[in-house]
Amino acid sequence: MNAAAASSSAATGNTRIVLGTCHHDCPDSCGWQVTVNGDGVATQLRGNPEHPYSQGELCPKVNRFLDRVYHPDRILTPLVRTGVKGSGEFRSASWDEALALVASRLRDTIDTHGGEAVVPWSSAGTQSTIMMSSLDRRFFARIGASRPVDSLCGATARNATASALGSPLVSDPLDVEHSKLVLLWGTNTRLTNRHLWPYVERARANGARVVVIDPVRTITADEADEFFQIAPGTDVALMLAMMHVIFAEGLADDAYLRDYTTGADELRRHVAEFTPQWAARHTGIDADRIRSLARDYATVRPAMIRTLIGAEHRHHGGQFFRTLSLLPAIVGSWRERGGGYARSTGSWFADAVDDSVFDVASLERSPRRSLSVNRLGENLTSTDLTPGVHALFVWNGNPLATAPDAGLIRRGLERHDLFTVVSEQFMTDTAMYADVIFPACTHVEYDDVVPAWGHLYLGFNNRAIEPVGESVPNTELWRRLARAMGYTEPELFESDESLLASCMPSIDIDELRSRSVLRLDLPDPLLPYAEGGFHTTDGKLHIANSELERAGHGRLPTYAPPPLPAADERSGPSSPLVLMSPKKHVRFLNTSYTPLDAHALPEGEPRCEITPRDAAARNIVDGDLVRVHNERGSMTLRAHVGDDVRIRDGMVSVPFGWSTSRTQDSQTVNMLTTSAPADWGGGVAFYDTVVWVDKAT
């Protein structure tokens, strides 16, 4: 451990306490502390009580993170496949042997098909800066590999918000404690953003009302003062009707609209037809409740809208975020602490952590085609791609369980002519199909910086222990692969310390290491648009947007019904149902935890939640085995029917996050989900999936 890192540790005898920051794809980015004994073994991992946001609390899965580190099933040496793909039959190999094999197959692929036949695929298995994506960009640029584009999560919300505000920058969600009205729109705060909930509770203790809008009755909805169980994909209709009421009843902030926006009069005329009665037909929400919600939002001050990324997973996900972004301007709530609109804070970190330095133009082999990470199955099985995909690298993710249309991904991974390399900690669904697996470090085994997307605190993760077995950090993997390929460019071998320094020139790294957490150098309170200042050419919010009109999204916000069966088409015993695949587990929200008994077994097994009415129409009772299926695949699991069902008629819910090893038939919900794109922003419409449900025979 270097001197700077040592300063972040408190030592007692031979025992050290090392500060770190959780790396999971979660808005909370909690602070932790690892106790390490004199033999260099981590003996305890707990929340850091000095962390200003998480304040010593971790979620149930991370409280037992050391179970992962020292689990007997952890992959600790390189593995080479010996059986058929998917059989899980591997043998241990030396690093030299595994690297030589990968380099040989990679050279053959490049010589035969060109660099674009090589495809990298990664996700947010770690949100830390250099382990998520740094030297990998340089390595694949040097190869001339296909360039991954789009995003399973976040891109649509970010890009659509920016299309409205001129920037993705929005309110500080922690300011919700100053609100008097909190709209939690399409976000299950108590489960997936649990450390924000105390701020919501503080607001309520000071007189705030909490309103939840969601098609699923979540554990957050259970705690709300009012719950609007909206029909799936109809949120924009509700927003337009709220605007109708606000304008019609003279509740808009005309001064804010006059001074800081353009196009407000167009919008006023545009929404005149979108009455609460009209919206009620689409949303399933009573017209009087819509009026009351609109009046409250316009008159109870301050009022904050809080959402995350769930709503982007629809064909019209971009329109959701574009329309939602306009509501605070209409009522002027950008002026007030505790007002505005809060989604991901990740864009606020761009100045502090500049990951563009990881792209090196001199390494590029152009042109390089772009392939969507959301369409991995199509890319692997396409007969039209020239060249086809002949080598696949997967790290920081498990696409066979987490990406859409996973059945097509499986068929691609089964190809005998596809060479697949995976970097992993455990034998995941995807790793089972690898030709070579490299052992990856866990987060307590390397240094890195962790930006957040749920608050404004930058975290440092100090390495607590040496890598277990022969595992290596992601950055070291790319260095070793570059060396095995015979590459010599120095940018491919830059050290972790240098990479961190280069991407954070304005941050005192020694101070960050020592404290493990620093708030971004931003105003407090953060009121980005209190006096306009929108990131547009004239500094005003363009409500009527000509650029969006040219792109086919409408000059003004528009509502289009989701591409789902209408309510009267979902009422019969053989009718299709709308599939939701929410996160709903307490002990794991990541597929890599499901192989661990302590995490997965308390959850039992995934179930198909179906309302009593829809179950009766199909002769299904609680506990029956049912088959959930569509043109993409089929999944067999037990039905959950009862008064505690959390969805509306016409819907079915199957939870996300389960590994194939924990399901009845080695299938997961993403065998069913669509890979159709969202309307803009590079996202994917997971939730616009239609299925049929039958009693299994």
Image: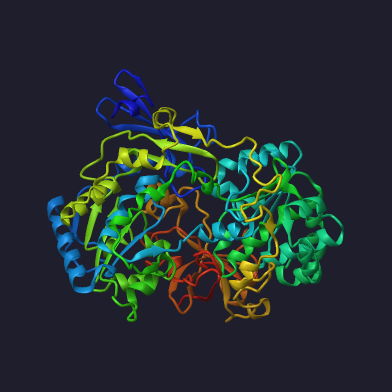
**Left or right position of 201 against 106:** right
Q: Residue at x 17, y 57 (%)?
A: 485
Q: Residue furthest front?
A: 538
**Left or right position of 6 against 179:** left
**Left or right position of 64 against 288:** left
Q: Quadrant of residue 470?
A: top left
In the image, residue 370 above or below residue 30: below
* Count of labels in the image: 0
Camera sees residue 596:
no
Residue 295 in the image: x percent, y percent?
82, 54
Q: Residue furthest top?
A: 13
Residue 270 in the image: x percent, y percent?
77, 69
Q: Residue at x 48, y 70 (%)?
A: 673
Q: Residue at x 34, y 70 (%)?
A: 410
Q: How is the image coloured?
A: rainbow
Quadrant containing the C terminus in the rendered view: bottom left
Residue 368 in the image: x percent, y percent?
33, 67
Q: Residue at x 33, y 72 (%)?
A: 380
**Is 138 in front, or is 201?**
138
Q: Quadrant of residue 262?
A: bottom right
Residue 447 in the image: x percent, y percent?
34, 38
**Is 657 in front, or is 195?**
195
**Left or right position of 214 against 80:** right
Quadrant containing the N terminus in the rendered view: top left
Q: Quadrant of residue 22?
A: top left
Camera sees residue 530:
yes
